[in-house]
Image (cartoon, rainbow, N blue to C red):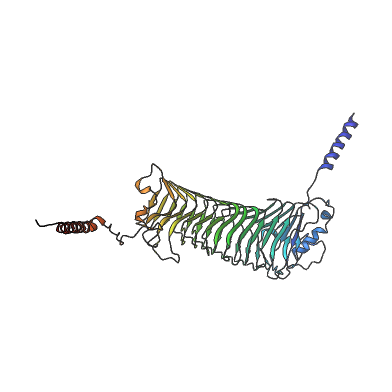
């Protein structure tokens, strides 16, 4: 009986040990000062690989990689970089991380600057070329500075799941302008996930991040002082989640944006977009843009101001500040065929020829608990004509304020320029400093019953306005009404007397002809 129990226990132990799957993590060290030529370098600091590419092949030549099932992702690989001059031994080819679970980080938490000054312009440091096997891929890059890259850092066109995480990474002075520095396409929506956490792009040239069908997370990160390309571009129903981040002093080409999204979703929270030369945010073709607790400040667009949505997109802004932005149309917000909702916002001193604060066309605008102001006394390159421009739109103000300062706008300025639209106002204070609250062409207005006299928004009477809806200035005198009765009454009296005299003369002549002496 004891023998049976003993063998049963041995069998159970064997079964348990046989079914346990132990994951082996391989750590390889890279030192640019190393002269090792070993095919399995990197297992120690003394035999470190001279470049990342040697560590890559060292892992592929290892027993762990060679015995890995063909239909399985490789076991974890950690590549640790020793500080040094990486510009001397830069690899000019592509390192294919498809099917890998790889982390690249400094050796012993030291500061590492990876210089890409000698990388080839046509190369990509890390890529994901699929080999027919359906494998997931994972790449983590931690605590490294990439400086003066002359090639793309990473790209992939993915039919399989991919996760890429950048954390505490700096990418500075990149000179790669042939395409985007980081580029991913996912052929299954959001199957590829790319995140940047505490990551900074600074002083780079060309476009930085382009994704298609990808989930992009940008957390506590920054893009500053870039030139010549869109910092973030997204297409094909990508999802962008940008939180607690900064976009500052970037310069993008005309008709480009700091954040551009063509179809998909953008969720911006706690983020500042400031002092950029270009549209801050542009969503087009069925994009949903949500902005919360953010600051959009002093951005200058070549044609459109700070935020642009068009082609059946939508914009929702909550608890945010949009100040001192400028463009020819829609200094703060430009919307075409895309509904806009604002609540608990401040929109202040934005500049544009049409729609200093908001330009809305072909859709609805809802403004709640929001202050829209202009109080600049200085000059402007724009001919400031209206604060809100509405064409074929329905605009609703609720518990808000529209305030205009005394200087800086043209004499015929109107707070709201309304064409073929409906303006609805509930408990909204209006201050115009002597200018018209509205100019109207085929417009209707509705004021809530609770509105005070200062809260009334209405089209000016037609008799008091010119054909374009602008009120005549006080220096213009109204033409006097002509009193035609006063003019023609004396003429009528004279004509009547003359008529009587003529009749009397005729009668006398007839009497003479009929007279006969007796």
Image x and y of residue 327, in percent: 50, 62
Residue 155 location, x and y as percent? 71, 60
- In this view, the residue in front, 289 or 182, is 289
Q: Position of residue 257 (x, y in %)?
A: 57, 61
Residue located farthest toward the left when viewing the structure as drawn: 518
Tell me if residue 321 can be seen: yes
Q: Position of residue 292 (x, y in %)?
A: 53, 50
Is residue 47 shown to the viewer in this render?
Answer: no
Quarter holding residue 376: bottom left
Look at the image and tell me in which quarter the N terminus lies. top right
In the visual, does 80 lie left or right of 320? right
* Nearest to the observer: residue 164 or residue 37: 164
With 34 as the anchor, is 18 left or right in this view?
right
User: Which residue is nearer to you in this view: 396 or 199?
Assistant: 396
- In the displayed structure image, the side of residue 24 where residue 451 appears, left or right: left
Question: Residue furthest toward the top?
Answer: 1
* Residue 38: quarter of image: bottom right
Q: On the image, which quarter does residue 197 sit in?
A: bottom right
Q: Locate residue 263 relative to residue 302 in the image: left or right.
A: right
Screen quadrant of the C terminus:
bottom left
How many numbered discs sit on the rendered protein? Answer: 0
Of 344 and 467, nearer the camera is: 467
């Amino acid at each position: 009986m004891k023998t049976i129990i003993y063998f049963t226990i041995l069998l159970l132990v064997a079964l348990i040990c046989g079914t346990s799957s132990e994951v082996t993590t391989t750590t390889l060290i890279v030192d640019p000062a190393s002269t090792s030529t070993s095919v399995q370098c990197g297992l120690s600091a003394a035999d470190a690989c001279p470049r990342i590419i040697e560590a890559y092949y060292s892992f592929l030549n290892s027993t762990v990689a060679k015995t890995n099932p063909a239909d399985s992702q490789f076991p974890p690989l950690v590549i640790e970089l020793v500080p040094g001059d990486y510009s001397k031994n830069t690899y000019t080819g592509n390192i294919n991380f498809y099917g890998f679970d790889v982390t690249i980080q400094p050796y012993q938490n030291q500061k590492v600057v990876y210089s890409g000054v000698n990388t080839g312009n046509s190369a990509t440091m890390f890529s994901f070329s699929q080999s027919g096997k359906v494998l997931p891929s994972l790449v983590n890059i931690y605590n490294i500075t990439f400086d003066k890259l002359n090639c793309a850092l990473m790209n992939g066109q993915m039919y399989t799941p991919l996760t890429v995480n950048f954390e505490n990474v700096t990418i500075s002075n990149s000179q790669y302008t042939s395409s985007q520095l980081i580029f991913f396409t996912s052929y299954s929506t959001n199957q590829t996930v790319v995140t940047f956490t505490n990551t900074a792009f600074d002083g780079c040239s060309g476009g930085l991040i382009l994704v298609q069908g990808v989930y992009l997370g940008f957390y506590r990160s920054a893009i500053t002082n870039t030139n010549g390309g869109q910092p973030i571009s997204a297409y094909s129903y990508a999802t962008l989640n940008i939180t607690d981040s900064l976009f500052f002093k970037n310069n993008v080409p005309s008709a480009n944006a700091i954040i551009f999204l063509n179809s998909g979703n953008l969720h911006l929270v706690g983020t500042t977009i400031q002092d950029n030369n270009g549209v801050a945010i542009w969503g087009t073709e069925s994009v949903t843009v949500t902005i919360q607790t953010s600051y959009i400040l002093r951005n200058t667009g070549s044609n459109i101001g700070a935020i642009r949505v068009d082609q059946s997109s939508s914009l929702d802004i909550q608890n945010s500040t949009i100040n001192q932005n400028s463009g020819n149309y829609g200094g703060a917000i430009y919307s075409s065929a895309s509904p806009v909702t604002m609540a608990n916002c401040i929109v202040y001193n934005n500049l544009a020829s049409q729609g200093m604060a908001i330009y809305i066309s072909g859709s609805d605008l809802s403004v709640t608990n929001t202050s829209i102001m202009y109080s600049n006394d200085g000059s402007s390159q724009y001919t400031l004509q209206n604060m809100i421009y509405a064409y074929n739109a329905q605009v609703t103000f609720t518990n808000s304020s529209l305030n205009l300062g005394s200087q800086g706008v043209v004499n015929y300025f109107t707070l709201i320029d309304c064409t073929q639209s409906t303006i609805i106002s509930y408990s909204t204070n209006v201050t115009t400093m002597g200018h018209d609250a509205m100019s109207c062409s085929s417009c209707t207005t509705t004021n809530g019953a609770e509105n005070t006299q200062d809260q009334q928004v209405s089209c000016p009477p037609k008799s008091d306005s010119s054909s374009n809806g602008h009120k005549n200035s006080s220096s213009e005198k109204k033409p006097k009404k002509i009193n035609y009765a006063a003019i023609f009454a004396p003429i009528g009296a004279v004509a009547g007397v003359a008529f009587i005299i003529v009749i009397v003369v005729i009668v006398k002549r007839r009497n003479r002809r009929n007279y006969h002496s007796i």
